[in-house]
Amino acid sequence: MDNIIQFAAIGFAAQLVDGAIGMAYGLTASSILLSFGIHPIVTSASVHAAEVFTTAVSGFSHWRLGNVDRAIFKRLLIPGMIGGGLGAYVLSNIPGGVVKPVISAYLLVMALVILVKALRPRVTAPSSSHWQGPMAFVGAMLDAIGGGGWGPVVTSSMIGWGIAPRMAIGTSNAVEFFVTMIVTGTLLPNVEGEMWNIVLGLILGGVFAAPLAALLTKRLPVRLLMGMVGAIIMLISLNDLTRAWAAW
């Protein structure tokens, strides 16, 4: 029971951040679980299994609050599901840490873009939407491999291109539900050992946090929200790059 309460606290904190700014659930939860010595495959499978439930609540909450763009949702859905399945397959055969420096460098650039845009009026989104499908594919694949990355890649990219933060966050959360189902289903056959106490704790904490996080997204000012997103991505990417450099 003590372990479940501990995992519930992790799930609550991770989902509160993710639901409010559209990212960092997987990165937060995975980094803590890995620090406990849990195997990367078990970590990713546990986080994504919990996200099936938390993203369902979060996505529904965002939809009810009008934070989901249906056109963007349709463009992200299929590529995201394919990328998630492929990433989960790769994780089962190749160490996920191999791609972390590349992810961190990309996120650092996106963080700078978002912070710059937070200091000036929001621009309109580009007329072409062809970039959204490939972005969802890459984001889902990296998310499955590294235990997190869908939000930082997909949500930050949409905000960086000028899509309103609350719409980018809400739509991203809604699509993420379907991505996590694919990732979880692909990873589960490769999991050895007990993981359901982890999943239960993450679910309990995340489900309680999801509606509150969606409400925060609705209420926070646009520029403040963008600044929070940029700052968090920058801190995460700088920390990962520092670790990669030290290991090198």
Image (tube, rainbow, N blue to C red):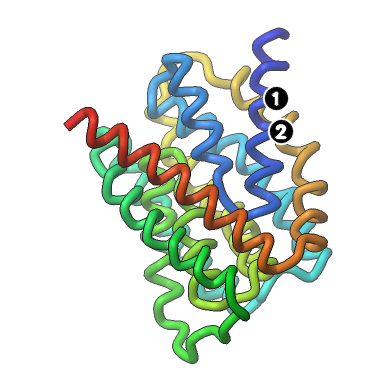
- x and y percent of residue 132 in the render? 45, 74
- Asked if disc 1 and disc 2 are in contact, CB closer than 8 Å, the reply is yes
Q: Is residue 93 visible?
A: no
For the point 49% across and 48% down, the residue is 182
Q: Is residue 15 above or below residue 39?
A: below
Observer-nearest residue: 16 or 228? 228
Observer-nearest residue: 217 or 154? 217
Residue with the mark numbered 2: 12
Q: Is residue 216 above or below residue 210?
A: below
Observer-nearest residue: 100 or 235? 235
Observer-nearest residue: 246 or 145? 246
Residue with the mark numbered 1: 9
Q: CA distance from mark 1 to mark 2?
A: 5 Å
Q: Residue furthest front?
A: 119
Give residue 210's quadrant in the image.
top right
For the point 70% across and 24% down, the residue is 8
For the point 66% across and 75% down, the residue is 69
Q: Amino acid at mark 2?
A: Phe
Q: Residues within 10 Å of mark 2 (few under 14, many from 20)?
A: many
Q: Residue furthest top?
A: 2
